[in-house]
Image (cartoon, rainbow, N blue to C red):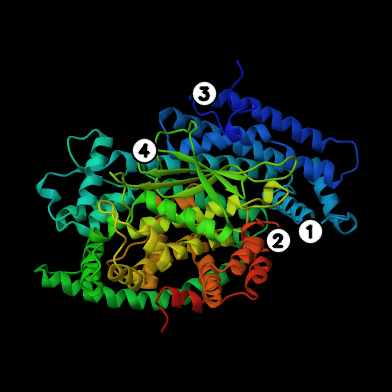
């Protein structure tokens, strides 16, 4: 029988036939797809004809279709709905795939063809997009070590394989710690918790097979527990478990893995002639150098730390007013910050949350996309990989644009966090293909599911990434959608968050779960007034993580990353009651792969642009100004990586932004 992963999918919109795919299909499908891709690469490299853009670059773009199809499905389910068999497959696949791609990047005949085209580029008559694709392919081969020889070449291949294995182990260890820990709650332990937290705890207990409600390490449950539980002892126990993920000793401890990853990255950069990994990694990004990254982060650190210290002093006073002696601790901050927000802004999240229904926030994200880009969303009844998932066809003027899949609820089989990925990216070569885009989140279940304001912001953020994929309009898949510089990729996502705060959006879609009444005007005003509440805390925990990431990679690899983390935080004067957003043993952005290594700063680099970009709409007089929306799509959302990101931003805005807009947007300006 034909392996369903390798078949032509005669399904609606050629979606993966999840109802026919089993875990036992992945390994044999990968074997065949790897063999097919290797043969395609060999045919390109060994072509006796002189290299041309068509027979080399376009041939590379067309190669690997079967492999992309297999991996698009596998990585979707292994990240969002893992099980022991899928984890086993991931451990087996990672080094094989690393070796496969290392073999391609080390193919001297193939590299020679690309190098020849690069030398002849001014005589080839290439269009702008073709020239960009040639440059990116050539640069990728050079940066992967294609010019290395002998022992250095062999060592680079071994490093890549080992890094792939370690990244998988890091991710699976973190998932295991998150999945295995939970804290049972008695009825007495539920006192003081709002209904939505109690409901989420009961749903989590049912999912874990516990006798009653539980607190898990899912952010969508543990954060509101830390915000609302008056039981300081339980807050401390839950918080300590949360920050100990990946550092509990035993087989799931990530500390030695992190140290080995950093050492291997340093060696990889050195083999390529760079002084350290940060210099290597940042070269193709907008920031360009570690110094420029550090300058940005430190420009924000000072105002953020000052705000956090002032806020912390007030929260410690509140702690003492409750008759508790001693210092404000990390498990106290969210609890007293919530009480302060309630007192100063008269904003109670327990009262706010019924107005932020998941389904209505999805509708809001869709409605904004319709008003800005004329997109329509029609529910689809198609087989998906988990019952929690749902799908929509995306159209414009009746024409198919994309399929969008949403997988919103937390579960033990899903890794933490939120992300967007494309099972199939937009392209026009070798034939037209429309994207299939997925948003994965970890919201607490409920009837109905209710979001915190941060959850709602996350939903809009990931949908901004999805729009970047769905509105892509380029020829070649390698530059499609979010295939852009790491410190540019967060611009569309963070920019889209601003539409959640547009008053007319909240007026229409923030409706009460029981009464259906719209959010009262006074509550709406308080939500918007409190938008920058606790920004000192949020900025400090983020910037500290970004500076630790940079310190890990900008210089010799640390022998003991935990000691380096402690030194960096001490030098910064990290407030006692605030921890890094992601401590080293759970810093999946940095250690599950190379994606955000030396690149966690990129959210803030993009925020400099998104604050300035939304100001363009405000200056135009409307968040839905059609001319600004058209310029945003034409210059950023549709262009993928077809042009230099700074050039794209200037085309949209007329100039590059400064840090002032970011500080103002976070309420940190002097």
| Residue 129 or residue 370, whichever sits in front | 370
Point out the tag, 1 or 4, that comes first from the N-terminus.
Answer: 1
Find the distance from the CA under tag 1 to the CA under tag 2: 8 Å
Label 2 packing within 10 angstroms: few (<14), some (14-19), many (20+): some
Name the residue: 46% across, 64% down.
499
Q: Closer to the camera: disc 1 or disc 4?
A: 1
Instruction: Point out the frontmost of discs 2 and 3.
Output: 3
Are circles 1 and 2 on residues that touch, CB within 8 Å?
Answer: yes
Q: Which residue is mark 4?
A: 251
Reading the image, the residue beneath label 3 is 20
For residue 228, above or below residue 435 = below
Q: Nearer the viewer, mark 1 or mark 3?
A: 3
Residue tagged 2: 643
Label 1 element class: helix
Q: Which residue is mark 1?
A: 128
Q: Is residue 649 visible?
A: yes
Q: Is residue 107 visible?
A: no
Image point (27%, 55%), residue name: 354
Residue shown at 19%/42% (left/top)? 213
Q: Position of residue 15 (x, y in %)?
A: 57, 34
Q: CA distance from mark 2 to mark 3?
A: 40 Å
The front one of 202 and 375 is 375
Q: Secondary structure at mark 4?
A: helix
Distance between the alpha carbons at the discs numbered 1 and 4: 51 Å
């Amino acid at each position: 029988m034909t392996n369903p992963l390798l078949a032509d999918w005669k399904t609606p919109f050629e979606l993966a036939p999840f109802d026919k795919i089993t875990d036992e299909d992945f390994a044999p499908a990968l074997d065949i797809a790897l063999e097919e891709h290797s043969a395609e690469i060999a045919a390109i490299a060994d072509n006796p004809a002189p290299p041309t853009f068509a027979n080399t670059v376009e041939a590379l773009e067309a190669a690997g279709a079967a492999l992309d199809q297999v991996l698009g499905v596998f990585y979707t389910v292994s990240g969002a709905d893992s099980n022991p068999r899928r984890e086993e497959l991931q451990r087996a696949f990672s080094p094989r795939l690393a070796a496969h791609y290392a073999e391609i990047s080390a193919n001297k005949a193939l590299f020679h063809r690309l190098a020849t085209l690069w030398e002849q580029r001014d005589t080839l008559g290439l269009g702008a997009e073709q020239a960009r694709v040639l440059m990116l392919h050539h640069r990728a081969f050079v940066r992967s070590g294609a010019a290395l020889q002998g022992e250095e070449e062999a060592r680079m291949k071994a490093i890549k394989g080992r890094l792939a294995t370690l990244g998988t182990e890091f991710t699976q260890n973190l998932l295991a710690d998150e999945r295995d820990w939970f804290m049972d709650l008695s009825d007495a332990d539920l006192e003081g918790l709002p209904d939505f937290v109690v409901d989420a705890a009961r749903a989590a207990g049912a999912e874990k097979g516990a006798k009653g409600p539980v607190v898990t390490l899912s952010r969508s449950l543990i954060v509101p527990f830390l915000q609302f539980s008056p039981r300081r002892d339980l807050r401390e126990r839950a918080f300590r478990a949360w920050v100990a993920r990946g550092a509990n000793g035993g087989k799931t401890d990530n500390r030695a893995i992190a140290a080995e990853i950093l050492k291997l990255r340093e060696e990889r950069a050195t083999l390529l002639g760079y002084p350290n990994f940060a210099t290597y990694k940042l070269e193709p990004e907008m920031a360009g150098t570690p110094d420029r990254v550090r300058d940005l982060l430190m420009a924000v650190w000072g105002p953020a730390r000052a705000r956090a210290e002032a806020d912390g002093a007030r929260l410690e006073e509140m702690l003492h007013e409750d008759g508790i002696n001693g210092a404000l601790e990390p498990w106290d901050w969210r609890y007293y910050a919530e009480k302060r927000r309630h007192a100063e802004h008269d904003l109670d999240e327990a009262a706010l949350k019924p107005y932020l229904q998941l389904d209505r926030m999805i509708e809001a994200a869709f409605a904004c996309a319709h008003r800005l880009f004329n997109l329509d969303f029609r529910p689809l009844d198609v087989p998906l990989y988990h019952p929690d998932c749902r799908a929509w066809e995306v159209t414009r003027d009746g024409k198919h644009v994309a399929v969008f899949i949403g997988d919103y609820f937390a579960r033990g089989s899903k890794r933490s966090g939120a992300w967007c990925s494309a099972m199939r990216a937009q392209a026009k070569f070798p034939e037209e293909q429309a994207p299939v885009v997925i948003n994965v989140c970890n919201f607490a279940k409920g009837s109905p599911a209710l979001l915190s304001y941060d959850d709602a912001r996350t939903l809009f953020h990931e949908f901004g990434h999805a729009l970047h994929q769905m509105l892509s309009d380029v020829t070649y898949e390698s530059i499609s959608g979010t295939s852009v510089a790491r410190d540019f990729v967060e611009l569309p996502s963070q920019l889209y968050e601003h539409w959640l705060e547009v008053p007319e959006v909240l007026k229409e879609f923030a409706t009460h779960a029981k009464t259906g009444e719209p959010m009262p005007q006074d509550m709406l005003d308080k939500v918007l007034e409190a938008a920058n509440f606790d920004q000192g805390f949020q900025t400090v925990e983020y910037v500290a993580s970004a500076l630790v990431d940079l310190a890990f990679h900008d210089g010799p690899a640390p022998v003991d990353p935990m000691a380096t983390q402690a030194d960096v935080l001490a030098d910064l004067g990290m407030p006692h009651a605030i921890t890094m957003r992601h401590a080293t043993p759970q810093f999946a952005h940095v250690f599950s792969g190379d994606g955000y290594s030396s690149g966690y700063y990129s959210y803030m680099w993009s925020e400099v642009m998104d604050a300035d970009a939304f100001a363009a709409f405000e200056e135009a007089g409307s968040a839905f100004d059609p001319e600004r929306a058209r310029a945003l799509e034409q210059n950023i959302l549709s262009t993928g990586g077809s042009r230099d990101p700074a050039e794209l931003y200037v085309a949209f805005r007329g100039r590059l932004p400064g840090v002032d807009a970011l500080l103002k947007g976070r309420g940190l300006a002097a």
